[in-house]
Amino acid sequence: MAIVLYAPALALSQNTGLNIWLSVISIGVICTFYSSIGGIKAIIWTDVLQFTFILVGLLPATIQGLMQLGGLKQTFLIASRGGRIEFDNVSFDPRTRHTVWTLIIGCSFNILAEYSFNQALVQRYLCVRSVRAARQVILINGIGIIIFILLLSLTGLVIYAFYANCDPYTAGLVSSSDQLFPYFVMEVLSNTIGLRGIFLACIFSASLSTISSGLNSLAAVFIEDVYQGLMRRRLNDEQLGRVSKIYSAILGAVVILLSFAVSYLGSVLNAALSLGGVLAGPIMGVFFLGFFFPRVQRRSALVGLLIGLALQIWIFLGAQMTKNRGQSRQLPLLVTNCSRLNITTLPLANMTTIGNANE
């Protein structure tokens, strides 16, 4: 959640010049407030509204980018020439991040963990009236997420094709690769009134939706498994509601503090995938253990969880400490045609003035 909180702060900083940490604190406080007060019902309804904003924010920028590039065929042609489209990479080299095998095997386990053991999703399954309804929810969500990922992938290809000959990050026009999308939106939608604001709403909607679900789920787990389980406290519904709000507020503050550490992890996407794997692997192992070997004692399962978590953390920290020592396998990025941008007008709070240098 700290990663999700940090990401929109980058976008807001890129578009308005507002300090990143002021953005982090503002988003965190707002999200913690309505998550604590409204509960799961408020979170579900705000998720619906926020997803609408996400679609409305993504589509105009992607469509406008396609139009300026000359269409879908031209976009794929540019991306293919740059080596960004690989459907046949079957390399077994463990240093290669994305291959057919990593996507099939890695994504399969990732999706299994997400849809089977993720408390935020399980909590939603429990909100429907029957098991059949829960299965329908999973099916609808699965179809929707496939379409959404395809849209995000297309957006990424459009951004690459748009800056194929002038990568803003390599040219020093943005301070982080995570700011490329906001930079792209500010350029292609610079003459369209209102759409840039909708884009910011899109970024914040994605963040608020994830954080609110996580806070509510963590509070529920803590109350059920720790407060009432290990501590053996018995509370009525009114007391449970009060304690849940308190823990949601505390967890929100912790997430805000952890977001400061996220800034040292590099790319937001890579950090999210890495930390997700660190936590999801051991937890999924415990569920598999209980499913296939129900006679295993709780203490043994806990020891296995801690050992697996320690191993994953060791691998993650080792990768972070040695990532600058190994040979870079990043595809080339060009800056041969950056003269088309008016780089004399690049203050982050004035991104709308970017245009052709000859204008």
Image (tube, rainbow, N blue to C red):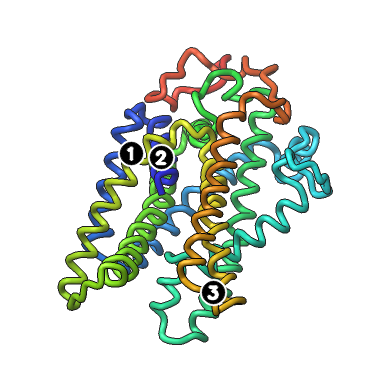
Query: Where, by quadrant of the figure, is residue 245 drawn?
Result: bottom left
**Percent coordinates x, y for residue 91 in the rendering:** 82, 45
Query: In the rendered view, would you say 21 is above or below 100?
Result: above
- Three-letter amino acid code of the residue under disc 1: Val
CA gap between label 1 and label 2 equals 6 Å
Mark 2 or mark 3: which is in front? 3
The residue that label 3 is drawn on is 296
The residue that label 2 is drawn on is 6
**Callout 2: 10 Å neighbours few (<14), some, many (20+)?**
many
**Callout 3: 10 Å neighbours few (<14), some, many (20+)?**
few
The residue that label 1 is drawn on is 24
Query: In the rendered view, would you say 249 is above or below 293?
Result: above
* Residue at x 37% of width, y 52% of height: 208
Mark 1 or mark 3: which is in front? 3
Query: In the rendered view, would you say 123 is above or below 205?
Result: below
Left or right: 33 with respect to 222? left
Which type of secondary structure does the marked residue at label 3 adopt? loop
Left or right: 281 with respect to 97? left
**Callout 1: 10 Å neighbours few (<14), some, many (20+)?**
many
Q: Specify whether residue 193 is in view.
A: yes
CA gap between label 1 and label 3 equals 43 Å
**Percent coordinates x, y for residue 295 in the rendering:** 55, 79
Q: Earlier in the sequence, mark 1 or mark 2?
A: 2
- Three-letter amino acid code of the residue under disc 2: Tyr
Task: Name the foreground residue: 58 vs 172.
Answer: 172
**Percent coordinates x, y for residue 6 in the rendering:** 40, 39
* Residue at x 36% of width, y 67% of height: 44
Q: Specify whether residue 194 is in view.
A: no
Task: Name the foreground residue: 49 vs 107.
Answer: 107
Query: Where, by quadrant of the figure, is residue 180 drawn?
Result: top right
